[in-house]
Image: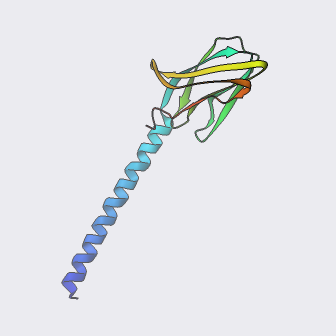
Amino acid sequence: MTRATRTAICSVAVTGLALGLSSCSEAVDQVDKAVNETYVVTYEVTGKNVDSIGFHDGGGKAMDPKVETVTNPKLPWTKTVTLRGIMPAAVMPVAADIEGAEVECRITYKGKVLEEQSAGGLATAGGCIAESPIAG
């Protein structure tokens, strides 16, 4: 291999590396921006004999959100919260009733339903978890 060929190959490799690092830097900038951006969602829970409702309230870290809990909520229950970045919106009702528990949950963002679930039975736990609209 001639010196000119080696120089050309090295030049192409260095250019590719520089472009790759530039793209990586742009991705990091986008993640940083998304983590600091906020969005507002409304949680709604209806049903019968709901014992408690856990929900992400915007506290904590994006991948380890703080869960707030309401016990013996009055139904229908709604709560509007501000979340950050890639933090998922989540509402988790828990119900138990020997005659049959019923729960329905919904998460809305700007009037659009992000997630909706319903369940029933002797004991019901679960809920709705929606991806951050900022991440998608």
| Residue 103 x/y as whole percent | 66, 20
User: In the figure, is residue 89 to the left or right of 47?
Assistant: left
Q: Quadrant of residue 18?
A: bottom left
User: In the figure, is residue 28 to the left or right of 6?
Assistant: right
| Residue 46 x/y as whole percent | 64, 15
Q: Quadrant of residue 60?
A: top right
**Residue at left offset 45%, top offset 34%:** 134
**Residue at left offset 44%, top offset 39%:** 33
**Residue at left offset 31%, top offset 60%:** 19
Q: Which residue lies furthest to the bottom in this view?
A: 1
Nearer-the-camera pick, 75 or 2: 75
Q: In this view, does 71 lie above or below 76?
A: below
Image quarter in which the N terminus is found: bottom left
Q: Residue furthest right?
A: 98
Q: How many marks?
A: 0
**Residue at left offset 74%, top offset 19%:** 100
Q: Quadrant of residue 129?
A: top right
Nearer-the-camera pick, 117 or 90: 117
Colour option used: rainbow
Q: In this view, does 35 lie above or below 114?
A: below
| Residue 121 x/y as whole percent | 71, 24
| Residue 132 x/y as whole percent | 50, 33
Image quarter in which the C terminus is found: top left
